[in-house]
Image (cartoon, helix red, strand yellow):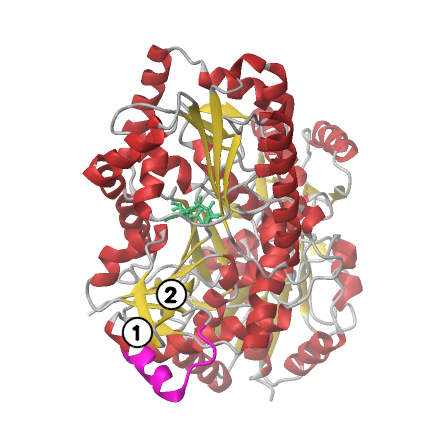
């Protein structure tokens, strides 16, 4: 039966030593609560690091493992040195600040990559050790970005999901990090990649394009012969739990105590003490508010709970000193013997106290400079069963894309934030109520259980392997059979594409030169008895002749419009049609070329092509879209086709496509010839269609194809051909 394997950096447990004994408790984090349902069902397992449990005796270690086993928690043990580099070094020292757009927090030299890789491999080992066929694997967060691909390599059929809890940075920033290709490829091992917001998903897609050159189709990416889905799943909170807690007698009594202390309105801040949470600017804004509004002295107080976090990381130690210096300055400047403007708690509070604070607050300030989602904002709303309180929310928190009725603020604008604090405190009662009611409707409808359900449903859907997809690689046994058939055929006819089939795409057509290995391979194939080789390309005669002129094979240029038979020196072709459209098209292409740095025009006999491989990827794609639209309107009555392909738009005389070579080739060949055609793009699909039922077709690379057989990449295509002569 299929089980859920949850894989996250931390196990949802807290290990402590009580009276000398090892004590293990469930820890009630947001993720743990959300996943507690699925985790308790169908033998699910949670795989993760158990926390810092050094100095255990062997007996204690064994007892801990037994207890974890009861809780269906699988520990991943990471040696202390690796742990520091993996967790504090690469994960929190580099990925965390970069993904939060805080380049000034990045170390000059990023360290810890090797440990990051080793730690991910340890997670992979544990997952593989527990994996059964059909299990769903759900990997969480930035510490494990390499894990999906590591698992894919070892468990090719596994159903793997990945969810990123923090923002994905703009591609301009993402591309600054070392090992950026490996990080993206690592994530693409998953079947479904989830984000909190559409913005993060777009940034990820744009990084795929810029860094790996992989385009995406809104929510789908084709990579390595697989489809990877992208999706937006904003995480919610356990609204029932927060509502019940807030209504409990214990919390209500505590709220009365907190409210009864004095007549001050309460402004609340609750954050992990992290430089992403915007605490310093929030304090500056509050300081300005106190300067601007002396009438509020003694009538308002900020309670700031700062939960210690990553305390061994230097940046966090510095940050703490800066926060505490600001608080000291403000309290020093404004306090009176009866009143202090800030109550500062440098520790975590228990659930009851947390709920009471949410409930007692008049205003909560959630002001991160960037935050994946921010659950504090949603927990506050879930706790306000009284419809009271005002949520002030940063536009840069993921939650802002859902919670439009909050009082929005820009944390970088300190002066304006100070005005917003005043506005929130003095919001008219009817507006306050209307905002909170709308917020509650939304937060209650999309709770954490909804999040888990919708992610897992999408993962099930994305990994429904009952319908063998058009992207499935051909099983090795079928490829082997094809090689045998080719080897034993009396007469063999090979029809080969070039760019993308035998060599990678180059930045301009004239640069895609065949390497020496390919030339040797083609010569050996050409020397094979009763074997004819035809290279069919979209390129011009000159380009093809320069590449293959010396090899005894048949050449076809411009999709077969021109042919140079084996051993011949002249090209033969059909009649060149009158092309009234050409001048006008050239004029438009020149205009786009001038406005799209890096693009270029290629003129051929029966077509004109616009290449944008060297243009800035996103602008190139944008311009290509515009150009296609423009050309399709303009040329709707002309005898041309507009063919869009990989980084190329081509306006081509109708009736010229690779399919035209098929009748010619078959007519020249002996009866019973075994025909094999190999190609990678849409033009090759025309060839495959014309050959249907008369030969075997092979598609090279990802994407859709009608071919009989698929090989993953150019290397595999060459290996298949080489097997005929080795
Ligand atoms: C990451 C992303 C994303 C805080 N203080 C106390 C306490 N908390 C609990 C809150 C809340 C959690 O900690 C904090 O969650 P956030 O979402 O605000 O922030 P991160 O820890 O940075 O989490 C974030 C999240 O992942 C989920 O995807 O939203 O953007 O950075 O649940 O209640 N709990 C208790 N005492 C405290 O003093 N009991």
Q: Position of residue 396 (x, y in %)?
A: 54, 34
- Along the horizontal axis of the image, is 266 left or right of 286? left
**Measured along the vertical axis of the image, is residue 1 above or below residue 396?**
below
- Along the horizontal axis of the image, is 146 left or right of 41? right
Magenta stretch?
Answer: 53-66
- Along the horizontal axis of the image, is 351 left or right of 402? left
**Measured along the vertical axis of the image, is residue 143 above or below residue 324?**
below
Residue at mark 1: 68
Q: Position of residue 527 (x, y in %)?
A: 67, 83
- Residue 668 in view (yes/no): yes
Q: Position of residue 251 (x, y in %)?
A: 26, 38
Q: Residues within 10 Å of mark 1 (few under 14, many from 20)?
A: some
Q: Residue at x 66, y 79 (%)?
A: 526
Mark found first going from the N terminus, 2 or 1: 2
Residue 168: numbered disc: none
- Secondary structure mostly seen in the magenta stretch: helix
536 inside magenta stretch: no
Q: Determine the secondary structure under disc 1.
A: helix
Residue at mark 2: 11
* Towards the viewer: 220 or 181: 181
- Residue 716 in view (yes/no): no
Dots 2 and 1: beta carbons under 8 Å?
yes
Q: Residue at x 32, y 17 (%)?
A: 433
């Amino acid at each position: 039966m299929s089980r859920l394997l949850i894989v996250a950096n931390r196990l949802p447990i807290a290990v402590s030593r009580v009276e000398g004994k090892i004590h293990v408790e469930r820890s009630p984090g947001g993720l743990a609560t959300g996943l507690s349902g699925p985790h308790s069902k169908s033998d699910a397992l949670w795989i993760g690091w158990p926390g810092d449990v050094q100095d255990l005796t062997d007996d204690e270690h064994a007892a801990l493992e037994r207890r974890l086993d009861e809780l269906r928690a699988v520990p991943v043990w990471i040696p202390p040195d690796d742990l520091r580099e993996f967790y504090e070094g690469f994960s929190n020292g580099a990925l965390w600040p970069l993904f939060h757009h805080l380049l000034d927090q990045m170390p000059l030299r990023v360290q810890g990559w090797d440990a990051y890789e080793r730690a991910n491999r340890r997670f992979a080992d544990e997952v593989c050790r527990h994996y059964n066929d059909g299990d769903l694997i759900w990997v969480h967060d930035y510490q494990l970005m390499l894990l999906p691909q590591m698992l894919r390599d070892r468990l090719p059929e596994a159903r793997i999901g990945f969810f990123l809890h923090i923002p994905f940075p703009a591609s301009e920033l993402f591309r600054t990090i070392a090992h950026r290709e490996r990080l993206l490829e690592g994530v693409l091992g998953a079947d479904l990649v989830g984000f909190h917001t559409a913005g993060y998903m777009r940034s990820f897609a744009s990084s795929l394009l810029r860094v790996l050159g992989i385009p995406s189709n809104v929510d789908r990416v084709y990579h390595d012969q697989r489809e990877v889905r992208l999706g937006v799943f904003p995480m919610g909170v356990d609204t029932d739990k927060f509502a019940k807690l807030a209504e409990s007698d214990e919390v209500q009594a505590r709220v009365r105590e907190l409210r009864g202390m004095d007549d001050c309105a309460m402004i609340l801040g609750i954050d992990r003490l992290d430089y992403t949470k915007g605490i310093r600017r929030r304090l500056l804004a509050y300081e300005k508010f106190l300067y601007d509004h002396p009438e509020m002295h003694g009538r308002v107080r900020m309670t700031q709970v700062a939960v210690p976090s990553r305390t061994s990381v230097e940046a966090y130690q510095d940050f703490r000193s800066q926060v505490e210096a600001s608080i000291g300055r403000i309290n020093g400047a404004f306090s009176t013997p009866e009143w202090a403007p800030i109550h500062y708690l440098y520790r975590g509070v228990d659930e009851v106290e947390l709920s009471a604070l949410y409930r007692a607050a008049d205003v909560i300030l959630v002001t991160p400079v960037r935050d994946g989602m921010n659950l504090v904002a949603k927990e506050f709303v879930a706790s306000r069963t009284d419809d009271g309180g005002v949520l002030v929310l940063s536009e840069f928190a993921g939650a802002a894309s859902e919670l439009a009725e909050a009082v929005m603020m820009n944390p970088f604008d300190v002066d304006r934030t100070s005005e917003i604090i005043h506005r929130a405190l003095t919001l008219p009662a009817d507006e306050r109520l209307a905002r909170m009611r709308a917020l509650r409707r939304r937060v209650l409808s999309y709770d954490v259980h909804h999040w888990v359900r919708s992610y897992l449903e999408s993962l099930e859907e994305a990994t429904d392997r009952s319908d063998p997809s058009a992207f499935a690689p051909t099983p090795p046994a079928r490829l082997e059979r094809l090689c045998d058939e080719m080897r034993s055929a009396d007469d063999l006819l090979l029809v080969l594409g070039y760019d993308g089939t035998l060599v990678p795409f180059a930045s301009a057509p004239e640069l895609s030169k065949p390497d020496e290995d390919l030339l040797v391979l083609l010569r050996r194939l050409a020397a094979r008895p009763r074997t004819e080789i035809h290279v069919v390309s979209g390129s011009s005669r000159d380009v093809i002749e320069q590449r293959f002129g010396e090899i005894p094979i048949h050449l076809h240029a411009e999709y077969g419009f021109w042919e140079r038979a084996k051993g011949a020196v002249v090209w033969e072709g059909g009649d060149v049609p009158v092309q009234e459209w050409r001048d006008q098209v050239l004029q438009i292409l020149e205009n786009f070329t001038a406005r799209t740095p890096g693009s270029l025009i290629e003129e051929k006999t029966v077509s004109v092509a616009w290449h944008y491989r060297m243009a800035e990827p996103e602008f190139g794609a944008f311009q290509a879209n515009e150009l296609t639209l423009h050309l399709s309107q303009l040329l709707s009555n002309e005898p041309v086709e507009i063919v869009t392909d990989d980084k190329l738009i081509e306006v081509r005389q109708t009736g010229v496509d690779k399919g035209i070579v098929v009748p010619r080739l078959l007519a020249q060949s002996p009866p019973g010839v075994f025909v094999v055609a190999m190609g990678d793009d849409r033009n090759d699909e025309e060839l495959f269609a014309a050959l249907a039922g008369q030969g075997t077709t092979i598609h090279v690379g990802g994407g859709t194809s009608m071919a009989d057989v698929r090989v993953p990449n150019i290397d595999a295509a060459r290996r298949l051909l080489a097997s005929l002569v080795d």
